Amino acid sequence: MIGLNSARFLNLFLFLNFLCLWCTQLHSQPATLSLSQAVDTGLKNYQTIQAKRNYYYASTSLRQNTKNEYLPNLITSMQQGYGTVNGAYGPLAAVGVAGAGGGLAVASAGPVSTSQNWNAAFGALYLATINWEFFSFGRVRSKIKMSSAQVDRDSADLLQEQFIHSVRVSSTYLNLLVAQRLVEVAKSNLNRTIFIQQAVKARTVTGLNPGVDSTQANSEVSRAKLLLIDSKNNENLVRNQLAQYLKVAPDPFQLDTTLFNRLPTELNTSASVSDNPQAKFYKRRLEYSDQTATFIKRSILPGFNFYSIIQTRASGFANNYSPDFPNRYTQSYLDGISPSRSNYLLGVSLSWNIMSIPKIKQQVNAQRFVSAAYRAEYDLIETQLRDQLILADQKLENSLESAREVPLQFKAASDAYLQKSVLYKNGLTTLVDLQQALYTLSRAEADKSLAYVNVWLALLQKAAASGDFDLFIKQASTL
């Protein structure tokens, strides 16, 4: 009975160890990174997109600030002081202290006495002013339109950067997929060359093959090892590039290998080149430049201003204070700051800087030249995108044809290699013929790995030219 319990305990212990080991291996395996997940991660983390997004937020705030400029200026001030009110006849100017960034000037108002006295009391001034340019002949409205055009430009710039980065991440993802597969192809090629090397050595030892075959086989093994090293270096380079685009550590990625086994089903798009985010950005930039020229042109126009002032004063000096009655003042703080006299003023003014006309005229001309330059660049990007779309269709057609032909090539190369290896083992062919068959098989294996991915790359190029990224991502990502 004790032995039976011990056996059960041992079985349970072994089962738990196996379960823990299985869970550890399961969690240690990296999760598969789908193409859509890679794109989403890149859009979320990439620094350039974050910068463009902040530029857009900044221009949005500036647009709201421009709208707020239409509000009137309401300024209030209150001052309370203590001092003398000696007056003196004489000219003066409100000039600050030189070299000190300006200074304060005394603005005391009092009678002119025959000698200096130091009678001092409290005084106060309360002031509220309103200044409102209520009509500017469309100048403020054009500035608001210019700010809105800037928001549209920065928004288009953000969308353009997101679109370009999505294409960039997708292209690098596919390139890394190919690089990883080429590493596997290089490993397979190395295994085959090692197998040939072992077969050659065995036949050389028995005298069935000359010693030169063994030397040549050793050379091919070294060549296959170097090819594997180059493939690994290329895979590391592309992986590091993808990690930069995703802003993650350049650890090995487990990618979606189903792209090697399937092709896209939808190859056509109804999107126009003018809807491409890159073309839209150039168009919004042109519109912003045109609005800027309109605003500069209208900035020479006059403006109507409504202004209102209300002023209240307080003084510790009596209204009949004079050199003959120098004691008619009080040093009471409350009496000195209590309002005693008020004035108000309402008015409308028209202001126009006539000399701004010749000054701003050249600024308008300069901005129009900038718009002409932007228009030429807009035409250039549209032409390039149209040509890229035509090239993408041609590349897509050729890639599909290659994808249909590659399985035939791979089967023929596999059969040829098998035939040559059997003939070599039986001494019916030379090592050169066998190695030639090996080269053909390795090339066909690499072509097979690239064929389907080239179709996806061609579809990505078409999506990048047309601006219809959904045409690619909805078919390429399945996880």
Image: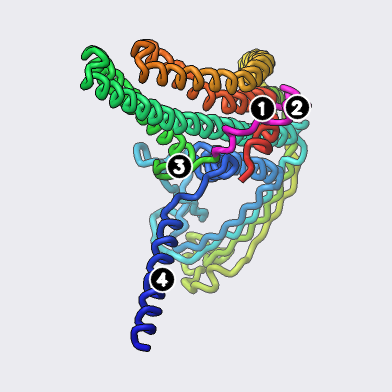
Main secondary structure of the magenta stretch: loop
Q: Amino acid at mark 2?
A: Thr
Q: Residues within 10 Å of mark 1 (few under 14, many from 20)?
A: many
Which element carries disc 2, helix, strand or loop?
A: loop
Task: Name the residue tied to disc 2.
Answer: 269
Whole-angstrom CA distance, mark 4 to mark 2, is 55 Å
- Report the residue marked by disc 4: 16
> Which residue matches tag 1?
463
Question: Residue at (43%, 66%) from the top-left corner?
Answer: 19
C-beta proximity under 8 Å, tags 2 and 1? yes
Q: Horizontally, is 45 left or right of 473 in the view? A: left
Is residue 362 visible in this depiction of the protein?
Answer: no
Label 4, residues with CA under 10 Å away: few <14, some 14-19, many ≥20: few
Q: Nearer the viewer, residue 189 or 7?
A: 7
Q: Which mark is residue 253?
A: 3
- Please give the name of the residue rendered at 73% of the width and 30% of the height, measured from the top-left corner: 266
